[in-house]
Amino acid sequence: MPGQLITYRECIKQAIREALQADERVFIMGEDVGRYGGAFAVSKNLLQEFGPERIMDTPLSEAGFVGAGIGAALGGMRPIVEVMTVNFSLLALDQIANNAATLLHMSGGQFNVPLVIRMSSGVGRQLAAQHSHSWEPLFAHLPGLRILSVGTHEDARYMLAPALADPDPVIIFEYTSMLNLEKELPDSAESIEISKAKVRRAGKDISIITYGTGVYKALEAATELAAAGIDAEVVDLRVLRPLDEETIVASVAKTNRAFLVEDASRSVSVSSEVSARIMERCFYDLDAPVQRLCGAEVPIPYPKHLEDASVPQPAQIVTAIKTLLQHA
Amino acid sequence: MEQQEQQSINPPLGNEQAKKLLYQMLLIRKFEEKSAEMYTQEKIRGFLHLYVGEEAVAVGVMQALRPEDNVLCTYREHGHALVRGLKPGVIMAEMYGRQEGCSRGRGGSMHLFDAKTKFYGGNAIVAGHLAMAVGMALADKKMKRDQLTCCFFGEGAMAEGAFHEAMNLAALWQVPVLFLCENNLYAMGTALRYTHAQTNLELKGAAFGIDSSTVDGMDLLAVIKAANTAVAAIRKTGKPHFLVCNTYRFRAHSMFDAELYRDKSEVEEWKKRDPIPGYFNYLLQQQILTDVDFKKIEGQVELEVKQAVDFAETCSLEPVEELTKYTYSEKQD
Ligand SMILES: Cc1ncc(C[n+]2csc(CCOP(=O)(O)OP(=O)(O)O)c2C)c(N)n1
């Protein structure tokens, strides 16, 4: 409804409810999705509404239930597998990388895997080194997967349906630090494509290219930059694999400058790849070298001041872009 | 020899030892309650998993270990750390994120580490530390060191493949590990019966050919006896042992848990079996300690917990310039 505020959490929940209502083959499984109500209360009361056949609590067995999700997808179901947080996804990485991502190709096109895996991700809650990973780049490395990153409320609400309609495995990164954030939802659901990046703010001076938690940070920075007379464009990648190169190229060709932002640590990151693509396609359009603001190369520490220092903050984006443009 | 062994399994409970054990139980309880309070005051952040109700397990098992043994725990480890000998002040400082903390403030509640007491965490990926425990015991075996490795985990962890791999390796290689399952009946909100098809957990040890036993984890003296027996066997044979302690957590899984999955009445039932009054009543009956002793110990514990908070309040934050320190070892020429 226009004008109404909704949390990111509620957006995800509505999307899941809608998917369960729309298709009998859809079911959710994961740790504590049912009786506990979801580790982050995303699936609260869904067990009561849909019953234990469709809201399945699993034991702590990530490899087991992700593998079973792949099997159920092969068997004609449309599972939504929830891995509580990305931090536990590596226990299932073999299933994802060696089965989900490869079956179609290995079988010569005979067996596709229509599976959706959701996982909450990212830093920002002082959960320290083992519970604060930004592993989008790791998964974005794997051919055969579609990797989505939910940087806005709109995508939280509308990305799940097209993901479920995809014949191939889709991994959706959601962000725990954004769950309580309230925003207005666009009044009608435009058809959401899960192959395209999206320009969240049009501008002419510089392209800020980002995803996930970077989107609202970049928009915040862009507002501040506007006050200083700098008109920044914000590109939300949304789909980290396969990358939508055309939207990136079109934006950089227009603004002639690219500034990349992400929480994941800098080396071999998503922005490493985007930077390379810009070099390949836009070298002669560039008025300045591509610049990046990424996560620090460190396991995430517990104390707030060190945690904050390990990922990009809006103020740093502003300062860096001002510097870049002065020197341009 | 036989008699000596019997003695170490069933030590006579002298006045001093009785006081020490009671002190440890109360220290965990009051330290945890204070931690919850400090969490509400936002002095402690992140995840905080409390051990209230399960104290008899850590206290009973830890007394069976020697300083040279290795200890590995989960994220619900404040109690274990306290009994192992970490100072309450450095644990509190750690949870305050201060550099005087046992992990320089970088780990927080879930990652208490201490080389001096051979306390290897504070591990927050469920079942992630079990294979490490096997490796530590393997190193001890290869180096012919007469010591064992004690690894604590919850019953939830036993559903992970990592549990089964670690158990098999330990049995295959015959290494001295005490696998210590704290079965508190819930893995977050998922009850034992929804986690395990076979709820008799001890049988899972037997499946690997590992000597296994089960004990009432609410009964300190029973835990002591079971732990002493298991540890004596490991020291004698060098083989692993699997000990299940049946217990219950009185509080939520963490500070983010609305406890939708269990009835308050169930919690109240279990509270009747609170290990602290249980143990103290025994001491009273046996005329080992008196109410006056209890009050005195309680007072000492409260003072120690207060001092821990006072200490943490005086501690400092690490400079932000040191952010990437300890990502790699500092090179030594
Ligand atoms: C591999 C992995 N999956 C999920 C989690 C999230 N999680 C943390 S504690 C926990 C429950 C563990 O239960 P149990 O092993 O019985 O120990 P307890 O917390 O009851 O002491 C879960 C699901 C995690 N930390 N690691």
Image (cartoon, helix red, strand yellow):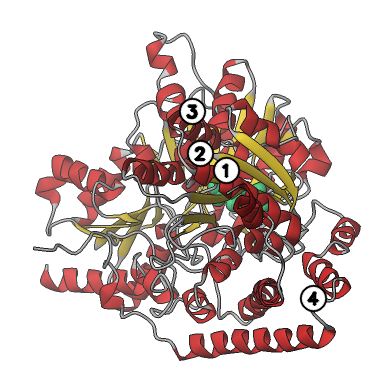
Q: Are the residues under marks 3 and 4 on the same chain?
A: no
Mark closer to the observer (3, 4): 4
Cβ–Cβ below 8 Å for labels 1 and 2? yes
Residue visible at 37% across and 42% down in the picture: B141
Q: Is residue A197 visible?
A: no
Mark linked to residue A169: 3
Q: Amino acid at mark 3?
A: Pro
Q: Secondary structure at mark 2?
A: helix
Residue visible at 27% across and 74% down in the picture: B322
Q: Amino acid at mark 2?
A: Thr
The residue at which mark 4 appears reads as B288
Q: Amino acid at mark 1?
A: Ala
Please identify the quadrant where the C terminus of chain B is shown. bottom left
Pinpoint residue B43: horizontal percent, then vertical percent. Answer: 55, 81
Q: Amino acid at mark 4?
A: Ile
Mark linked to residue A321: none
The residue at which mark 2 appears reads as B237
Vertically, is B144 above or below A145?
Answer: below
Q: CA distance from mark 4 to mark 2?
A: 35 Å
Q: Are the residues under marks 1 and 2 on the same chain?
A: yes
Q: CA distance from mark 2 to mark 3?
A: 50 Å
Chain identifier of the residue bearing label 4 in the image? B
Q: Is residue B66 left or right of residue B327?
A: right
The residue at which mark 1 appears reads as B233
Q: Secondary structure at mark 3?
A: loop
